[in-house]
Amino acid sequence: MGITGRDKQKLAGAVDAIRKHGGVAHGVQLEVTHPTEIQEGVSQIAKELGGLDLVVACVGGHEGSPWLMETTSEDWTKTFQLNVVHSVDVARASVPYLRDTGRGSILLISSITGWRPGPASSYAAAKAALIHLAATLAQELGPYRIRVNALSPGSTGDTEGWLEYQREDPAEFAKFLKEELPLHRLVTVEEVSNVACLVLSPRGSGINGANITVDGGQYRPHAIRFPNSV
């Protein structure tokens, strides 16, 4: 397995964790908003691993305020660069190694915010673009026998942001679970990764151009509401 990240310490920790469980891992430190670093990183990983079969583009986030009138064009450009353009760069760099293996598979990590309205608007638009990018690339890369899909997790309870929200405002967190999630709980990282492995693997060989949701039936994508007055 090859992993990339910009935080050297966290990257080393992830590689060590995989190796401790008997896996083979190679880490490359890079910044995903720099296309040349992506190209070099993918090439380095492919060389270390003897090729590529499966690729996941999973970096996300947004720049600036969640509210339109408080954002700038630069915020939107950076948000699309981080979410969408980096995924394009990863896919482009990976195709030479994936094509004609008969098992090439690319997974773009979108979000529930990509298909259900929620703040931030720039993030929502970028994640929606990833869903359509997956559908489009599935058609374009299909002749190379490369499958491309999107995965849209809901709010994931054992990630830093949601753990912090639960600690800081337990009453609002409980209200959110009750009102927005029919299972009255958030999904977990393991539940999301289980589905990612299925979609990427030969068991998911018939899945192509799809957006797979793992959200427990969640309705609104965030506890933050849009303003109802201006």
Image (cartoon, rainbow, N blue to C red):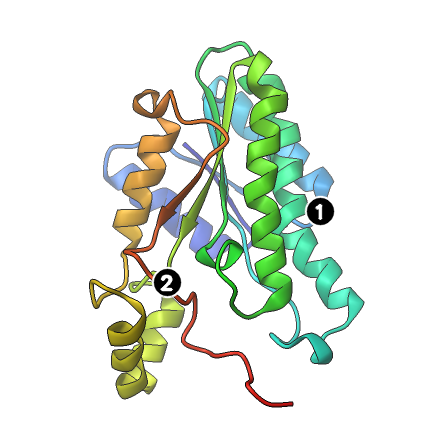
The correct choice, above or below, for 66 with respect to 112 in the image is below
Q: Where residue 2 sits in the image (x, y, percent)?
A: 46, 34
Q: Amino acid at mark 1?
A: His
Residue at the far left in the pictured view: 183
**Neighbourhood count class around disc 1 (C-alpha, 10 Å): few under 14, some 14–19, many 20 upward:** some
- Pinpoint residue 62: horizontal percent, then vertical percent: 60, 64
Side (left or right) of 50 relative to 207: right
What residue appears at the point 66 percent right and 29 percent down from the top-left corner? 92
Image vertical order of residue 56 relative to residue 120, above or below: above
Give the residue furthest to the front: 229
Residue for point 56% across, 36% down: 134
Crowding around mark 2 (Cα neighbors within 10 Å: few <14, some 14 to 19, many 20+) is many
Residue 107: x, y in percent?
Answer: 48, 36
User: Quick one: SS at disc 1?
Assistant: loop
Above or below 139: residue 152: below
Q: Is residue 125 left or right of residue 26?
A: right
Instruction: Point out the image quarter for the C terminus.
Output: bottom right
182 vs 130, nearest the viewer: 182
**Image quadrant where one finds the N terminus:** top left
Asked if residue 43 shows in the view, the reply is no
Amino acid carrying label 2: it is: Ser
Instruction: Examine the rendered structure and indicate whether residue 91 appears above or below residue 8.
Output: above
The residue identified by callout 1 is 34
Mark in front: 2 vs 1: 2
Mark before the other along the chain sequence, 2 or 1: 1
Image quadrant where residue 76 sits? bottom right
Whether residue 81 appears in this view of the structure is yes
Q: Is residue 67 left or right of residue 21?
A: right
Residue in the image at 65% along x and 68% along y: 63
Mark carried by residue 155: 2
